[in-house]
Amino acid sequence: FPSHDTPGKKIDIERLKELSEKYHKELDSLQKRIWEMAGTEFNIASPKQLGEILFVKLDLKPKNQKKTSTGSYSTKESELEKLKELHPIAELILEYRELAKLLGTYIDTIPNQVDEKSRLHADFIQTGTTTGRMASQNPNLQNIPNKTDLGREIRKSFIASNDIVTGK
């Protein structure tokens, strides 16, 4: 890891590892439940396969259904929200996506981004937004959810300390 002049943010790596184990089990459980409802195994992360399951196999017909530019059925979040009233599979798919995103973007990734002192050094960019606010990347710490239980669990892995002031 490169040497950093800034103190970085202390990360509880063990907590993230525990969350990873717990949430991967939950992701597997969600996957099995989705497959049961669909009556077949498929790649939930594949918009094409998901569209086939929802709109062909299960024959779900949401109001004002959108299609992609290539003519496929859209499976973006707003379209899945429309399906929640039609079938419980939609809610599970939304949960699956949120969990997979948090695992892939934060829980499983951050431990590999810390330095030898378990400190995370994200990049802050002054010119990264059109509004003039600071932006964060590698990882984007500003996108960790704070309104969901999952997001709050990730945030608990960031350890507050007095050494930010002293640099120790």
Image (cartoon, rainbow, N blue to C red):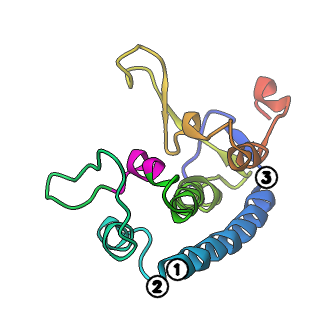
At mark 1, the secondary structure is helix
Amino acid on which the number 1 mark rests in the picture: Trp
Judge left or right: residue 49 versus residue 118. Answer: left
Labels 3 and 2 touching (C-beta < 8 A)? no
Q: Which mark is residue 12?
A: 3
Question: In the image, residue 130 lies at what x, y percent?
Answer: 34, 18
Labels 1 and 2 touching (C-beta < 8 A)? yes
At mark 2, the secondary structure is loop
Which residue is painted at 64% across and 45% down in the image?
120
Q: Residues within 10 Å of mark 1 (few under 14, many from 20)?
A: some
Judge left or right: residue 132 versus residue 37. Answer: left
The region drawn magenta spans 75-82
Q: Nearer the viewer, residue 27 or 107?
A: 27
Question: In the image, residue 52 lies at what x, y percent?
Answer: 31, 72
Between discs 3 and 2, the one toward the N terminus: 3
Find the residue positioned furthest to the right.
Answer: 162
Labels 1 and 3 touching (C-beta < 8 A)? no
Circle 1 is placed at which residue position? Answer: 35
Which residue is painted at 71% across and 48% down in the image?
154
Give the quadrant of residue 102: bottom right
Which residue is painted at 66% across and 75% down in the image?
29
Give the quadrant of residue 127: top left
Question: In the image, residue 116 lies at what x, y percent?
Answer: 69, 55
Magenta-drawn stretch, dominant element (helix, strand or loop)? helix
Q: Nearer the viewer, residue 97 or 122?
A: 97
Circle 2 is placed at which residue position? Answer: 41
The N terminus lies in quadrant: bottom right
